[in-house]
Amino acid sequence: MIDRLLIAYCLAGKRDVMKLLVVVVALLVVAVSANPYADDCGPKERVEFRQQWTDVYGIGDQRIQLGQDIFNKYVQ
C-alpha cells in the first residue's frame, strides 16, 4: 500500500496525495467509531480482562522481568 502511495505521490501532485490521505484517515475514524462491538465490554468484563492481564503479564517487577527475559531470549 505504501508503494502505491509513493507512486501516486510521484505521478500526481502533493495536493492530490494529501486529499487521498485525508480521505483514508477519515474512513478509518468512521470505521473505528462505528465499531458495533465497542459497547460489549461492561464493568464485569473489564474486571475479568484486568485480572487476566495481571495473570499473564504480572505486576510491577514481574512485568519488567518478563520483558528482560523475552529480550534476552530473542534479541541476544
Image (spheres, helix red, strand yellow):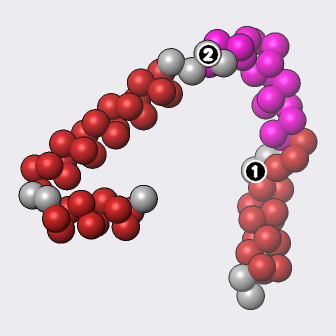
Q: Going 85% across and 31% down the picture, which residue do you hit?
A: 51
Residue density around tag 1, few if under 14, some if 14–19, many if 20 or more, within 10 Å: few
Instruction: Identify whether 75 is placed above or below 7.
Output: below
Residue 48 lies in the magenta stretch: yes
Instruction: Read off the residue under disc 1.
Output: 60
Point out the image quarter for the N terminus.
bottom left
Residue 70 lies in the magenta stretch: no
As helix, strand or loop, the secondary structure at mark 1 comes to loop
Instruction: Identify whether 25 is placed above or below 39.
Output: below
Instruction: Identify whether 4 is placed above or below 30.
Output: below
Q: Going 47% across and 21% down the picture, which residue do you hit?
A: 33
Q: Amino acid at mark 1?
A: Gly
Q: Residue furthest front?
A: 11
Q: Amino acid at mark 2?
A: Pro
Please state if 16 lies on the left or on the right of 59 as rendered: left
Instruction: Read off the residue under disc 2.
Output: 36
Q: Nearer the viewer, residue 55 or 30?
A: 30
User: In this view of the protein, can residue 61 be seen by the observer?
Assistant: no
Please state if 47 lies on the left or on the right of 15 as rendered: right
Point out the image quarter for the C terminus.
bottom right
Report the span colored magenta: 38-54
